[in-house]
Image: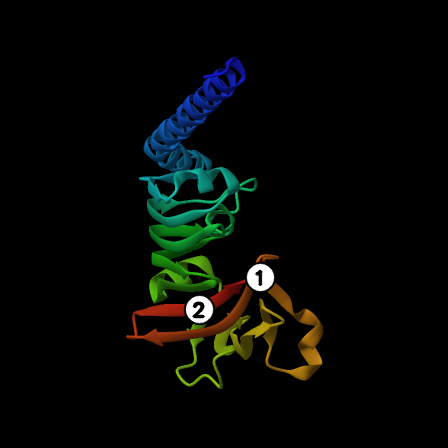
Amino acid sequence: MSSDRRRRRTRAWYLSVTLGCLFALLLVIAAVAQLILPGIAADRIADSLETHATGVRVSVSATPALELLFGRADHVSVHIDNLSPSAHHKGIGQLLNEISGTDQLDAVVQHALVGVLELQNIDLTKRGQQLVGHATVTQAAIENALPVALHIDATNPDVHTLLLRASTTIFGHTIAGTAAVKIEAGKLVIAPDNPLLAPLRLTLFSDSQLELTSISERSDGQRYTFAATARYL
């Protein structure tokens, strides 16, 4: 065998060994990432929530786990006992931003304070770009939070509108009115059900990543359970 052929065979052998070692190293890196990256991602989400929440438990899964480095995940599960947003943390909105990169989400918040209103049994489910949420509020919580008697109409006109009836007493006189909570351009707004008072419209929820698509409610007389659907943009 000539010396040139021996050198070529030697170089080919070293190249195959090097490629084999690199491939083995990549397999080791992928295996280690599969073990540690989901836990790191779960801890990061939990840490971002624990400043204004208690009883936070998060699990994350992704295959391959390296996709977590690019903000993607296959499934995220979140459980929160109590959520009390502050001026610097937007609570549910922050949670929605944290999990926007997952294909599947199952989140439960047992109690949350939104302004002065207490919500219960909040659950959020995300499948692909579609988000479905439910939350319950008691009539007692509404009465404690608001200076008016507020009731939600049992017959709402469509899947984009809820009608609210409110009354209060001023100097012995009862004043009543109706307002509409509705979806407009993917946002949730409230406005008096009177065209002359339209400038009093307020935005209740708006998120650049989400487009609300429907709202509804059901009641047993003591509590209201609201449902909403949205789509990630």
User: In the displayed structure, would residue 34 be above or below residue 61?
Assistant: above
Amino acid marked by disc 2: Ala
Of the numbered discs 2 and 1, the one sitting upstream in the chain is 2
Query: Where in the figure is residue 95, as x and y percent of width and height?
Result: 46, 48
Mark number for residue 228? 2
Please name whichever residue, 19 or 57, is drawn nearer the observer in this view of the structure.
19
Q: Which residue is mark 1?
A: 233
The residue at 39%/42% (across/down) is 64
Neighbour class for label 1 at 10 Å: few (<14), some, many (≥20)? Answer: few
Query: Where in the figure is residue 89, as x and y percent of width and height?
Result: 52, 42
Neighbour class for label 2 at 10 Å: few (<14), some, many (≥20)? Answer: some
Query: CA separation, marks 2 and 1?
Result: 16 Å
Amino acid marked by disc 1: Leu
Q: Secondary structure at mark 1?
A: loop
On screen, residue 135 versus residue 199, left or right, reads left
User: In the displayed structure, would residue 166 be above or below residue 43?
Assistant: below
Please name whichever residue, 58 or 41, is drawn nearer the observer in this view of the structure.
41
User: Foreground mark, 2 or 1?
Assistant: 1
Query: Where in the figure is residue 223, as x and y percent of width and height?
Result: 32, 68
Q: Residue furthest top?
A: 3
Tell me which corner region of the image, top left, top right, bottom left or bottom right, holds residue 210. bottom right
